[in-house]
């Protein structure tokens, strides 16, 4: 679950439906993004960052932080072995 994404929504006292309306998304998409069941497009991620006035790395650390990039790390380990 993307706790920071959910936390920022709650700080603004917004429902998932309100976020969806503000970002022209479906409520289901917002729910899946918060749960981590779906990844946003870069444009959608930027829209969240603007809405919450937070960095992409903070809202989506599993996508935008290199330290959390387990797929890349596994790929590099296979190449080096």
Image (tube, grey):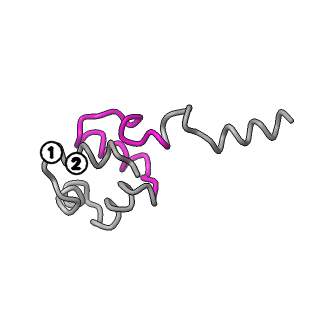
In the picture, measured across the screen, residue 63 lies left or right of residue 18, that is: right
- For the point 44% across and 39% down, the residue is 61
Please state the extent of the stretch shown in magenta in the rendering. Answer: 38-62
Q: Residue at x 36, y 40 (%)?
A: 59
Secondary structure type for disc 2: helix
Residue that appears at 22% across and 43% down:
51
Q: Considering the whole magenta stretch, tell me its main secondary structure.
A: helix
Q: Nearer the viewer, residue 72 or 11?
A: 11
**Total marks drawn?**
2
**Membership of 47 in magenta stretch:** yes
- 58 lies above or below 13: above
Q: Position of residue 20 (x, y in %)?
A: 24, 60
Horizontally, residue 51 falls left or right of residue 62, namely left
Residue with the mark numbered 2? 9
Examine the rendered structure and indicate whether residue 10 appears above or below residue 79: below
Identify the disc placed on residue 36. Answer: none
- Horizontal side of 79 relative to 63 (left or right) equals right
Q: Secondary structure at mark 1?
A: loop
Horizontal and vertical percent position of residue 81: 86, 36
Residue 28, how many percent across, how many down? 32, 67
Residue 29 on the magenta segment: no
Residue name at image x 83 percent, y 33 percent: 80
| Residue that protrudes farthest toward the left in the picture | 13
Residue that mark 1 sits on: 12
Q: Residue 29 placed where, x, y %? A: 35, 63
Query: Which residue is more in the foreground, 71 or 45?
Result: 71
On the image, which quarter does residue 22 sit in?
A: bottom left
Instruction: Measure how far apart labels 2 and 1 are at the Cα level.
Output: 5 Å
Vertical side of 40 occupied by 73: above or below: above
Q: Are marks 2 and 1 in contact (CB under 8 Å)?
A: yes
Q: Quadrant of residue 24?
A: bottom left
Q: Using a 10 Å C-alpha cutoff, classify the residue at mark 1 as few (fewer than 14 neighbours), some (14 to 19) or many (20 or more).
A: few
């Amino acid at each position: 679950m993307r706790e920071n994404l959910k936390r920022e929504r709650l700080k603004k006292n917004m429902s998932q439906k309100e976020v969806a309306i503000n970002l022209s998304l479906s409520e289901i998409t917002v729910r899946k993004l918060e749960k981590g069941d779906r990844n946003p497009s870069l444009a959608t991620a930027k829209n969240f960052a603007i809405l919450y006035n937070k960095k992409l790395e903070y809202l989506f650390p599993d996508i935008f932080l290199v330290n959390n990039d387990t797929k890349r790390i596994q790929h590099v380990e296979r190449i080096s072995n």
